[in-house]
Image: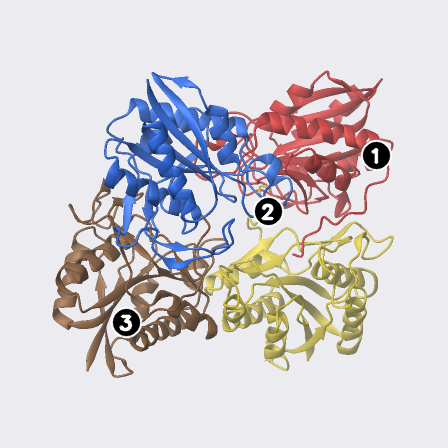
Chain colours: A blue, B red, C yellow, D brown
Amino acid sequence: MSAVLVTGIEPFESDPTNPSWDIAQALDGMQVDGAVIVARQLPCVFGLANEKLVEAIEDTSPTLVFALGLATGRTEISVERVAINVIDARIPDNAGNQPVDTPVVAGGPAAYFSTLPIKAIVQTLREAGVPTGVSQSAGTYNCNHLFYGLMHHIATRARHVRGGFIHVPTTPELAALHAGRPSLSIDTQIKGILLAVRTALATQADLKMSGGAVH
Amino acid sequence: MSAVLVTGIEPFESDPTNPSWDIAQALDGMQVDGAVIVARQLPCVFGLANEKLVEAIEDTSPTLVFALGLATGRTEISVERVAINVIDARIPDNAGNQPVDTPVVAGGPAAYFSTLPIKAIVQTLREAGVPTGVSQSAGTYNCNHLFYGLMHHIATRARHVRGGFIHVPTTPELAALHAGRPSLSIDTQIKGILLAVRTALATQADLKMSGGAVH
Amino acid sequence: MSAVLVTGIEPFESDPTNPSWDIAQALDGMQVDGAVIVARQLPCVFGLANEKLVEAIEDTSPTLVFALGLATGRTEISVERVAINVIDARIPDNAGNQPVDTPVVAGGPAAYFSTLPIKAIVQTLREAGVPTGVSQSAGTYNCNHLFYGLMHHIATRARHVRGGFIHVPTTPELAALHAGRPSLSIDTQIKGILLAVRTALATQADLKMSGGAVH
Amino acid sequence: MSAVLVTGIEPFESDPTNPSWDIAQALDGMQVDGAVIVARQLPCVFGLANEKLVEAIEDTSPTLVFALGLATGRTEISVERVAINVIDARIPDNAGNQPVDTPVVAGGPAAYFSTLPIKAIVQTLREAGVPTGVSQSAGTYNCNHLFYGLMHHIATRARHVRGGFIHVPTTPELAALHAGRPSLSIDTQIKGILLAVRTALATQADLKMSGGAVH
């Protein structure tokens, strides 16, 4: 049985939990369409997060990797299109480091595209009632760093693996601690990510469906 | 046993359902803290909505009225503070009427404040993990018209009744038909409105807690 | 020659200037359509602001009063429709006071509508290329307090005077101190408010033109 | 005297003008710090825009290229960080074409970073009172296509040239045709782009200053 690695990130900034890890945990061990989902938590620490991700890939030999991260302020599940080779941290990571304009991988290419079927995932989740969209930028913080690290590892050392990154919104419980923040319940998020995994397992060539941004 | 009237509105614009009515239906008949919840659907039609609301109040003799309405685009449950005596419709109602700058009640006062304990409701829901806030404007469309009609009826003919209006966000299922819309699952919404009813039943004097807007 | 009183507010929170006062100053002494514009600065202090406003009205005997205030975060000139009888301060005023849920005028009506021709002002400014809209809420802070105080004074002691409140956006210079804030140049703002004054001088009955909010 | 090429784009969608071209025209022929600014208009047509851009570079032999484009909805001047090798058009271009998920340059690298000193430009403009920020995505429409085409030409055939892309907000005059849109006056925009050109002429190594996005 092939493995699907789903990673979440530990809590960061002032949030007590991180929905990306709650989702991964909820899916851990689940068997779906002939594959088993394996979850791993990654630290919110530049460098170390990517070392742990590579260890997890080497441990679990997945055919598919979904890296998840939290994007407070977003309204829907955001399937990221592209990882860029830069770290520009607006806030320190959990080890207190705040790199500005350094590459994720020195000498690496400027960017990698996701190899998940991002349009098919968006269409399937929407049809199932889960608000979802394509995102053209994963930012320049730990999530983009992880996404770039994943795709660089795949491109250089694990070319048979497909992978990508999905940003998830905050939950109602976390949003209620503040004012005016959009959220999506953890049940809806778990349902969405499970469907995304199943869509990726079933889809080789992505759909040709508009998901762009004018600017 | 005293009655709590909870009203929802029929679907309008292009939405196939209206969460405000789904919530009301889910609570219909529930017994809570010595009161029974009675739900009624109201039309999205100027004038008629308020006639049906008055009929519902006369039918059910409630001590408490919660009028609910949908506010697509809002991220949280919005407890409305004030109803104003104007209709200025940006889109036609379900009967095709689109009044501009006409009063809800000719000769009525400029506004009425909610007599629900709006700050206590916000605090209780937030503590329960339901994103909630005070709203300073219910707009100038059918929801404000209904809110004003409710408070005018209470002020002139049913002074022992307490009442107010709550705007609810759209649901994930409706948001998924579009792109980028915030939503809140219907379960979270039902939980929130039930808590709001219980808070109102238990609270006479509202909390003194900041819930304002600078502008 | 009749007088038009235009008031601006002193700087508050962390901003070094307040565009509402810069606009008023720029128009001070200008003769327009048979009237002279007189500018006065008001403090950002609950109570005192309204005392100074009444003094200014008694001093200058205007036929028209435009009270202006800053609304950082808004993208356009906002012609306010309604003042409500509540103060609910999210931040302290410049004297350190932060009232919560107290009336502007104890025993006053719940609200007053602007007596400016708000729709004609919006149409005229838009045609002149100045982004402008109707706003359904002036908030619950000093600006709404001032707006309510103005309309209460007019209603009870100066019924021949017409008046209202306009919120203006921040300027590019103030926006540049932060990230991502919308702004409007002070020249465009001055042009807009001058046009608003001229529109009010020329208009008795307001236009019937949609300017509402669905919620 | 060296040349600085500044390009703007023709109007698209329903807008009667395009501020990116108005700015370029206003700067055309200006001599600044030992260089002369040369302006060229480019079509909003995939493929053709990039051919015309290459022609303009070959004609004018610039040392510096600023490609400008309109981003309605943005509040400030957006200095783009990265161009990605994909076209995913949400609306047709001015020739009626709407490519979905095709590369800008088949076989080209996934992305190019701007070689303008983007952080120094942001800092200088902000200090001059012009709202400005770094943007992590130029979208997937004509502007990103042009930005990628520019950087690919530089990387493969004109390595001594520095270049990049700046998105500008709409103007008050265009914003006034709609409701609620942010804008920046054309004078402020011209001042900002001129300062950006001067900053690039004076700066070799960019500042190390945070300008990232958490997600």
Q: Which residue is mark 1?
A: B203
D25 relative to C76 in the view: left or right: left
Q: Residue at x 49, y 59 (%)?
A: C180
> Residue under mark 1: which chain is it in?
B
* Between D186 and B75, the one nearer to me in the picture: B75
| Snapshot quadrant of residue B71 | top right
Taking D35 as reference, is A97 left or right? Answer: right
Residue C43 bears which disc, if any?
none
CA distance separating discs 1 and 3: 65 Å
Disc 1 crowd, CA 10 A, few/some/many (<14, 14-19, 20+): some
Nearest the eye: D89 or C161? D89
Residue A187 visible, this orientation: yes
Question: Which mark is nearer the camera, 1 or 2?
Answer: 2
Q: Pointer 2: what residue?
A: A14
Residue at mark 3:
D25
Labels 1, 3: one chain: no
Q: Position of B148 compared to D162: left or right? A: right
**Residue A108, x across and y down, in percent:** 26, 51
Q: Quadrant of the C terminus of chain B?
A: bottom right
| Residue A39 image offset from top left, x and y in percent | 44, 29
Q: What is the quadrant of residue A149 in the picture?
A: top left
Instruction: Identify residue type, mark 3.
Output: Gln
Q: Inspect the image, locate mark 1, and give the three-letter code of the amino acid beneath it.
A: Thr
The amino acid type found where label 2 is placed reads Ser
Q: Residues within 10 Å of mark 3 (few under 14, many from 20)?
A: many
- How far apart marks 1 and 2 lie (CA) works out to 32 Å
Q: Is residue A173 above or below residue C174?
A: above
Q: Is residue A61 above or below residue C46?
A: above
